[in-house]
Structure formats: structure tokens, C-alpha cells
Amino acid sequence: MKLEKELGLKAGIKVTEHEALLNIYYTGDLLKKRARDFFTQYGITDVQFNLMNLLYYQAEEKTGLTQAELGRMLLVNRSNVTSLIDRAEKAGLVVRVDVPGDRRYNAIRLTSKGRKIIEDVEERYMDEVKKVIGILEKSEIDILIRSLERIRQNMREV
Amino acid sequence: MKLEKELGLKAGIKVTEHEALLNIYYTGDLLKKRARDFFTQYGITDVQFNLMNLLYYQAEEKTGLTQAELGRMLLVNRSNVTSLIDRAEKAGLVVRVDVPGDRRYNAIRLTSKGRKIIEDVEERYMDEVKKVIGILEKSEIDILIRSLERIRQNMREV
DNA sequence: TATCGACAGTTTATATATGAACTATTATAT
DNA sequence: ATATAATAGTTCATATATAAACTGTCGATA
């Protein structure tokens, strides 16, 4: 269904490029709301899942990731990372650990609780993702990804 | 460029459907950041632009839109609409007006200041949007829109 | 080696977003 | 006609997000 109709717009979206942009926004919003609902049953937020998922797959278990690295990977700024880690640490999902040899860094590591949650949840979440996105053929997904990559590339250039 | 590389991920994204989802998220985030930067020069936020744009095109000038209608069109909940309107009203962009015949509603209307800003900014913003999204051919944009519509449709069904 | 610039992280003010509990008003069903 | 549903909006607690100003630490260099 056209976005205009989904949102109950009386006047149409006049510029096709704008319609594409709004489709990206709103689809992302809806996917995020759905992810938030999904993770609620496991007592975590969607953002906390993404954070823990990065720590699980992108970090050596013994070293963790620094807050600056997490910010780059999550595409959020450092002050936001501080507050994300504050809450995740308070919830017992991660810990801040000193990095020997450079006192500027915090290494962020999953706790055993955080690790266990990822191990419990990840496969079920991926099944959900496959169910939702899998309405598209593999070749269509590849085209979608490629188009979004080109938009981001273009943003860096213009 | 692949998202993995853009974000500096060491381990790849294993599930193609998940890669697509993350591409939608991150592209939307980057577009939003860019819009925010763009509107800063006009003293408004990207969210305020979207709000005012709806009031400009989707409402009769004399009647405005209710907060519930705005919430449906912006895909945000009513408590968020309350705070958006609070700030936009404080900034002199919109006003709350009583609706005759039903005291539950607020009609939200653009002020002349709000109207003027939209008239000043909209064309320039659309040029930006065309520049960023226009890296894709019209036919590719149509396919992108159609794929995102199908994902949303599928979310409503599963 | 003293300093200066770069980098990591925190704090504060503010905007955006949700859900739950609330008030007020209107529509409906008996 | 009245009790009940539904609807519109607000308030409060909380999460996520940014920018700007700040502290602390490290590296480069003069």
C-alpha cells in the first residue's frame, strides 16, 4: 500500500525522491517499533540488543570494545554511548573495565548475564527478521541493499 | 560501500535479511542527521519541518489538524504529539485552537511565521532530497519504494 | 622535557519517543 | 435517561539522541 494511504494523507506526496525518503524513514520506524515489542519479552530494549550483539560478535571476549568504537558502530555520538552504557551497566548486561596501558579508554564487556541473553534471543530474533524481510526474494533484497548503499555513498559525496 | 565496512565491523553480518534491515535503519539515520543539519540554518528541527509540512499541505488553512491526526500521520504517539506541539507553539510556529462543537479536540494551525518558514524552506529542502536520492534512476526509486511497501505490508500480516 | 593538540569519556541542557495512568468530553447501548 | 465505551489530550517516568563545554590522558614536537 502507498505510504500516503497508510498515513491517511489527503494531499499526495509530490516529489518521488521525497516519497522514497519518507518510505525509508517510516519503514525503519515500523521495524524499530516491532523490534522494541519483540525484545520487551526478554526485558531488554532494541538498542540494548544491538549493543550486546556488537559486543558478542565484534569483540574479543577478553578485551571488549571501547565506547568510541561502539559509537562508530552504532552511529551515535559519544555522549549517547555514555548514557547507553550507564543503563546497560545498571541492568547488569555489560561492565566497564580499565584498559591496561591507556587510562583514557573503557573496555566494555558483556557480563555472563548479557552473554546468556544474546545466546537465548539472537536466533529467535533472526527468525523474526527473516519472516519480515523475507517477503522479498533474495535478488530483490540484494537490489534493496545496493540502492541504500548508493544513497549513503552519494551522501558522502555531495 | 558495504555497511560492514562503513561501520568498521570486524565480523560480517551473517544474515542477508538482517543486513537489509540494518541498511534501512542506518540509511534512515544518516538521512535524518543530514536533514537536521540542513534545517538548523533555518532555526527549526527536522521534526518541526515535517510537522509544519503536514499542516501546510494536509490541512485546510482555516481548520488545521487535530493532534490525533498529526500523530497518525507522523507515526508517533499522542504524548509525543503533545510535547512536539508544546515546543512548536512556544517557538511561535503553530497554535492550538478550540474546535467548535467538540471540546475534546485541539485544532493545530500554522502561524504566519510557521507558514512563511515552510514557504521559504520547502523548495530548497526538496532540492536537497532530489540531490541525495536522485543518484538512483526513477525506475530504481520506484522499485525501492515498492520493496519497502511490501515489507510494511508483510509486517501488518505476520 | 614542557607544552600543545588529539583523543576518550562525562556532564548538562534540550529534543524526540514510548507507555501507563490520568482528566475531560462525546458517543453508544440499553 | 443514564451508565458505559470510546476518543482526545495531558502528565509523568524513562529511553534514546544530539551539541557544547568540560576533565583526564596520551602522543608528538619543538
Image (cartoon, coloured by chain):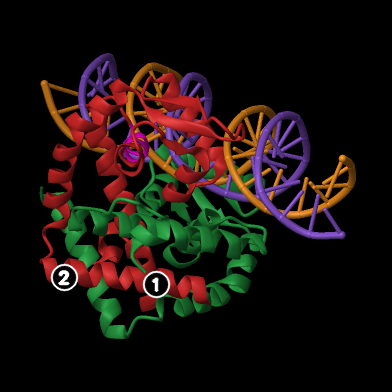
Chain colours: A green, B red, C purple, D orange
Residue numbers of the magenta segment: B45-52
Camera sees residue B134:
yes
**B8 relative to B100, above or below:** below
The reply to the same-chain question for discs 2 and 1 is yes
Residue type for callout 2: Glu
Q: Where is residue A63? Give x, y as percent.
A: 48, 57
Q: Nearer the viewer, residue B42 or B69?
A: B69
Which element is circle 1 on?
Answer: helix
Check disc 2: other Cα within 10 Å, few if <14, some if 14-19, many if 20+.
some
Instruction: Please report whichever mark, 2 or 1, sits nearer to the chain's N-terminal start.
Output: 2
State the CA–CA distance, disc 2 to disc 1. 17 Å
D30 with respect to B149 (left or right): left
Residue B106 placed where, x, y %? 53, 32
Label 1: chain? B
Give the image quarter of residue A90: top right
Residue drawn 44% across the image and 19% down it: B90
Relative to D6, B31 lies left or right:
left
Q: Which mark is residue B140?
A: 2
Q: Main secondary structure of the magenta part?
A: helix
Q: Is residue A97 visible?
A: no
Disc sitting over residue B151 in the figure? 1
Q: Is residue B49 above or below residue B75?
A: above
In the rendered image, residue B47 lying in the magenta stretch gets the answer yes
B144 left or right of A3 in image: left
Dot 1 alpha-carbon crowd within 10 angstroms: few under 14, some 14 to 19, many 20 or more: many
Instruction: Give residue A48's quadrant in the image.
Output: bottom right
Quadrant the N terminus of chain A occupies: bottom left
Query: In the image, is residue A52 part of the stretch drawn in magenta?
Result: no
From this view, report whether residue B138 is shown above or below residue C9: below
Name the residue rendered at 37%, 31% in the picture: B62
